[in-house]
Each structure stands twice: as structure tokens, then as C-alpha cells.
Image: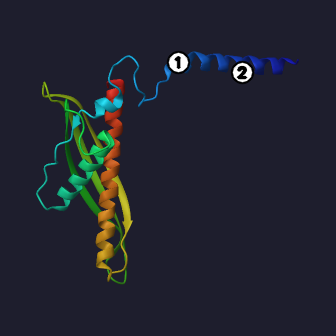
Amino acid sequence: MSSAKLRLAARLAAVVALAALTAGCFQPMYAEHRDGSPDLRDKLATVDVPPVDKPNASREARVGVAIRNALAFKLYGNATGAPPLYRLVLRFTTTRSSLMIDVNTGLPTSENYGIDAQYNLVEIATNKSLMTGSTFSRVSYDMPGSYQRFARSRAFRDAEDRAADEIAENINTRLAAYFTAGT
């Protein structure tokens, strides 16, 4: 056997040995714990998501409900969770900007919709802030011809829903990381 093949075999053996040593370090994030401690799903179910404080019947109130519903589904799998130990305070602002304008009509043909959200995880028993963070979402959508008002309105609403779902996903991921790693 040549020395090049021996070096390659030695390197492969070292990689396999390192992989074997670290194989026991990995634990899936959503795995159940055998020691009786609460798993991640149980911890996420104890997060209360109160309604977002926005004026009633406003577009932002509808977006706040969409974020809250998407987050509740991601945290609990349904509308309610376990008795709450934590409260997630959520604030957000929205933006809308035109990307392209039709030169003939002067109307936008493509727009961006954005949500900038700030959240704070508070322990209910002590009213102590455990974690704060911010996230954002930007989605673009096409606006059909100037005579299709319903299609324009529906495109905007769909963009709001996609952005709200993305915000909920980002917050859920951050909460899962916090409850798993403690930071």
C-alpha cells in the first residue's frame, strides 16, 4: 500500500473517530425528555400571547390578529395552550412602498409590504423580562391592472398574511432557541 493511501486511510479513521465522539452530543430540539423534565413543546405551550394593542377595525388590528393566531398555532398547535407561565408582549409597525409604477396609468404595479416587530418574553410570576428581540418581514406583491380593484385589495391582504406568518415563524424559532439553550 502506498503512503498516499495510508495517509488517506488515517485521515478517514480520524474523521470517523471524531464523528463517533460527537454523536452523543446531538439531541433533537423537539425530542421528548426521558428524565421527566418538560420538553420544548410543553414549555412553548406555557407562553401566553395576549391581543396586540392596535385600534379596532384598523388594518393593523387585522394584521395583529393574524400574527397572534399564527403564533398561537405554532406554539400550541391550537387556539390555547397550558396554564401560562410566560407572557409574550408584541408590538409592530407596518410599511408599504411602491416598487414599480405603470407609466400609462401612474398606478403601482408592484409593491412591498413590511412588518417590523419587537417582542418581549415576560415571566408572569415575577413580571421580569426574560428575553427581548426584534424581527422583520418584507414581502412583495404584484398589483393587477387599474380596473381590478378586488384583485388589488386581495393581493395586498395576501401580502399582509404572508408577512404575519413569517413574523410568527421568526418569533417561534427564537422562543424555541431560548427555551432549549436558555439564552
| Label 2 or label 1, whichever comes before in sequence order | 2
Give whichever of 1, 50 is nearer the camera.
50
Describe the element under mark 2 as helix, strand or loop: helix
Which mark is in front, 2 or 1?
Answer: 1
Tell me if mark 1 has few (under 14), some (14-19) or many (20+) residues whose alpha carbon lies within 10 angstroms of its own.
few
* Rendered-image quadrant of the N terminus: top right
Give the amino acid type for the residue marked by disc 1 in the picture.
Gly
- Distance of label 2 from label 1 (alpha carbons): 20 Å
The label shown at residue 41 is none
Query: Image check: 62 left or right of 159?
Result: left
Q: Which residue is mark 1?
A: 24
Q: How is the image coloured?
A: rainbow
Q: Residue at x 61, y 18 (%)?
A: 20
Give the amino acid type for the residue marked by disc 2 in the picture.
Leu
Give whichever of 14, 23 is nearer the camera.
23
Q: How many marks?
A: 2
User: To which quarter of the image does residue 163 belong?
Assistant: bottom left
Residue 61 percent across, percent down from the top left: 17, 56
Residue 92 percent across, percent down from the top left: 21, 49
Q: Which residue is mark 2?
A: 12
Residue 41 percent across, percent down from the top left: 34, 32
* Rendered-image quadrant of the C terminus: top left
User: To which quarter of the image does residue 129 belong?
Assistant: top left
Describe the element under mark 1 as helix, strand or loop: helix
Residue 117 percent across, percent down from the top left: 25, 46
Give whichever of 115, 99 is nearer the camera.
115
Give whichever of 20, 130 is nearer the camera.
20
Tell me if mark 2 has few (under 14), some (14-19) or many (20+) residues whose alpha carbon lies within 10 angstroms of its own.
few
Q: Residue at x 36, y 38 (%)?
A: 173
User: To which quarter of the image does residue 100 belong?
Assistant: bottom left
Q: Where 59 falls versus 131 (above or below)?
A: below
